Image (spheres, grey):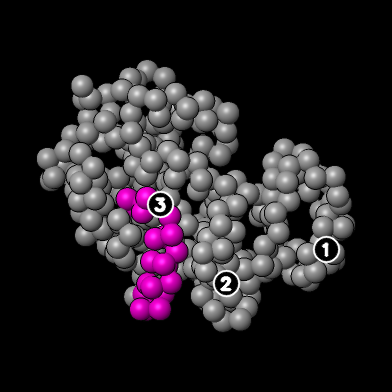
């Protein structure tokens, strides 16, 4: 018999930290808001670092990824833990969905389902071609190079023709370890930002606007990006809702990131179904919406 209805998954930086800053305080606040919402539903809740060795994961009926934002630094340990843990308890969202969402190949699957995704080329691990050859084949002057499995803007580079030669060795080193992809650079992102729309059970909740710092294109806060409240338009909601509802089963929670492409059309940047920041602190009712969705599972 499980001891907890839900275990919120975090990582070591946010697990009872002695030293705190605004970044850490925000993470803790987000989990506190969700914990309170779950408790109001009569559910028992714990919050554990996914990498802890001193706990019995079978004590959780459902595990919910929240702030496990270091897992991409520990792939082997993470997948070992995931493979073992999925045998003894359930996850919100389900593990097949999480595995699918880890690899950005899913963008091309969604493109086949009439979701607008910008021009993208996959580069498989151990590809022996030079970056120059791949760049010329792609046929786009201004590109973004990034891993297929990544987070937080890791190994994400904006490159023009003048940059290719100086990045050849870096590309060679990365492609020997993991698959990557090229995308056409989108000029509206540094000018207008990127939108994040939050969905629970496929239903829209709220949105934020993420802007890169001056001179950058990466909107993540670890690269100096800033976040603002945003009232999503009907067009933005319908586009994002269409994207997330292409996933079967429809995710219990998810964040859809969109922007205006070079043709000024809404386009999908990514769908985050693993451990998205959901900005409960900017819209407290969203924590109750997620708690209600989780209650339906129990």
Query: Is 274 drawn above or below residue 199 in the view shown?
Result: above
Q: Residue at coordinates 57% horizontally, 72% vertically from top-left?
A: 189
Name the residue rendered at 37%, 50% in the picture: 249
Q: Which of the 4 quarters of the picture holds residue 3? A: top left
Q: Residues within 10 Å of mark 1 (few under 14, many from 20)?
A: few
Left or right: residue 257 versus residue 261 is left
Residue for point 51% across, 37% down: 71
* Residue under the point 80% across and 69% down: 139
Q: Alpha-carbon distance for marks 1 and 2? A: 24 Å
User: Which quadrant: the C terminus?
Assistant: top left
Q: Pointer 3: what residue?
A: 248
Q: Which residues are magenta?
A: 232-253
Disc 3 residue crowd, few under 14, some 14–19, many 20+, Cα 10 Å: few
Q: Nearer the viewer, residue 63 or 215?
A: 63
Taking depth in this image into account, of 26 and 198 the one nearest to the observer is: 198
Label 1 belongs to which residue? 137
Locate residue 279, reporting x and y percent: 35, 57
Q: CA distance from mark 3 to mark 2?
A: 29 Å
Position of residue 176 in the picture relative to residue 148 (left or right): right
Q: Nearer the viewer, mark 1 or mark 2?
A: 1
Residue 134 coordinates in the image, percent (x, y): 82, 58
Which of the two discs, 1 and 3, sits closer to the camera? 3
Asked if 36 appears above or below 207 in the picture, the reply is above
As helix, strand or loop, the secondary structure at mark 2 comes to helix
Q: Are marks 1 and 3 in contact (CB under 8 Å)?
A: no
Residue linked to disc 2: 189
Which marked residue is nearer to the observer: mark 3 or mark 2? 3
Name the spot of residue 132 as percent of width and height, x first. 86, 58
Which quadrant: the N terminus? top left
* Residue 269 visible somewhere in the drawing: no
Residue 289 falls within the magenta-colored stretch = no
């Amino acid at each position: 018999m499980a001891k907890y209805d839900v275990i919120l998954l975090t990582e070591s930086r946010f697990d009872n930290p002695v030293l705190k800053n605004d970044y850490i305080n925000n993470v803790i606040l987000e989990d506190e808001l969700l914990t309170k919402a779950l408790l109001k539903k009569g559910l028992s809740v714990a919050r554990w670092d996914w990498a802890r060795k001193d706990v019995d994961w079978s004590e959780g009926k459902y595990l919910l990824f929240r702030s496990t934002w270091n897992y991409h630094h520990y792939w082997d340990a993470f997948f070992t833990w995931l493979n073992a843990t999925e045998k003894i308890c359930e996850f919100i969202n389900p593990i097949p969905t999480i595995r699918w969402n880890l690899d950005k190949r899913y963008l091309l699957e969604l493109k086949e389902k009439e979701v607008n995704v910008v021009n993208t080329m996959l580069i498989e691990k151990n590809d022996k071609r030079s970056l120059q050859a791949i760049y010329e084949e792609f046929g786009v002057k201004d590109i973004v190079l990034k891993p297929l499995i990544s987070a937080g803007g890791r190994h994400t580079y904006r490159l023009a023709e003048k940059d290719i030669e100086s990045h050849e060795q870096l590309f060679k080193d990365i492609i020997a370890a993991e698959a990557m992809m090229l995308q056409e650079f989108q000029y509206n992102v540094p000018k207008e930002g990127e939108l994040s729309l939050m969905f629970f059970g496929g239903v829209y909740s709220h949105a934020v606007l993420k802007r890169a710092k001056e001179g950058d294109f990466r909107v993540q806060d670890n690269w100096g990006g800033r976040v603002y409240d945003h009232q999503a338009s009907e067009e933005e909601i319908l586009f994002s809702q269409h994207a997330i509802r292409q996933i079967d089963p429809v995710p219990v929670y998810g964040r859809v990131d969109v922007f205006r492409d070079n043709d000024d059309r809404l386009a999908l940047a990514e769908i985050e179904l693993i451990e998205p920041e959901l900005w409960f602190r900017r819209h407290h009712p969203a924590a109750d919406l997620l708690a209600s969705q989780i209650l339906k599972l129990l």
